[in-house]
Amino acid sequence: MTTKTKENLTYRSVGDFRIPNLTLPPEEANITLGKWGMLYKDYLLKNKKAVFSTLLAEGKLYQHCAEIENQARNMLDTLVEQMKVSEGVTEHLKEQDQLEWVQRMNNIQQRANEIVFNELIYT
């Protein structure tokens, strides 16, 4: 037996108890998470369960993770560009010594990733 109250909640009777029929709000169906958003979601799930549950219950989990994804991408791009300039990694170096350029770019990429992890993902 299902009953309805003035708050538009429906209840079902189980024995002597009335249990509310609760549903989670629908998530944004068109949000696709990339690397950073998925890493952040996994971090919340494993380390910040209360925050994860709250965002999930409010229907804002994927939206929040997508915002972190965008921030992480922007931060990574900015950091890589700043490090390239400060360390003199240029197109001229790429033309002169490709191996040196690749090594330095890989180093910059790794350091920038580590900063993004520490500043945005694992907070």
Image (spheres, rainbow, N blue to C red):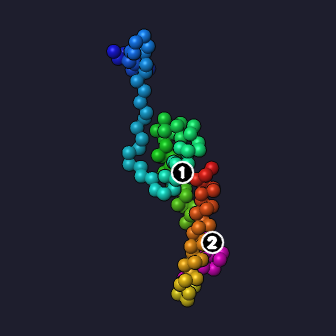
Q: Is residue 121 magenta?
A: no
Vertical placement of 29 versus 93: above or below? above
Vertical placement of 96 versus 40: above or below? below
Furthest residue toward bottom: 96
Picture residue at 43% right of the left edge, 21% below the top: 20
Q: Is residue 83 magenta?
A: yes
Q: Which segment is the magenta one?
A: 82-91
Residue 17 in the image, given as x and y percentages of width and height: 44, 13
Which image quarter: residue 90?
Answer: bottom right
| Res. 74 mark | none
Residue 66 in the image, given as x and y percentages of width and height: 48, 51
Q: Dot 2 lies on which element?
A: helix
Q: Amino acid at mark 2?
A: Met
Vertical placement of 30 versus 108: above or below? above
Q: Which secondary structure class fits the magenta region best?
A: helix
Q: Dot 1 lies on which element?
A: helix
Residue 69 in the image, given as x and y percentages of width and height: 51, 55
Picture residue at 48% right of the left edge, 41% below the top: 60
- Residue corresponding to mark 2: 83
Furthest residue toward right: 86
Residue 21 in view of the camera: yes
- Residue corresponding to mark 1: 40
Q: How many marks?
A: 2
Vertical placement of 95 versus 3: above or below? below
Residue 92 in view of the camera: no
In front: label 1 or label 2: 1
Furthest residue toward top: 16
Furthest residue toward left: 1
Picture residue at 38% right of the left edge, 48% below the top: 30
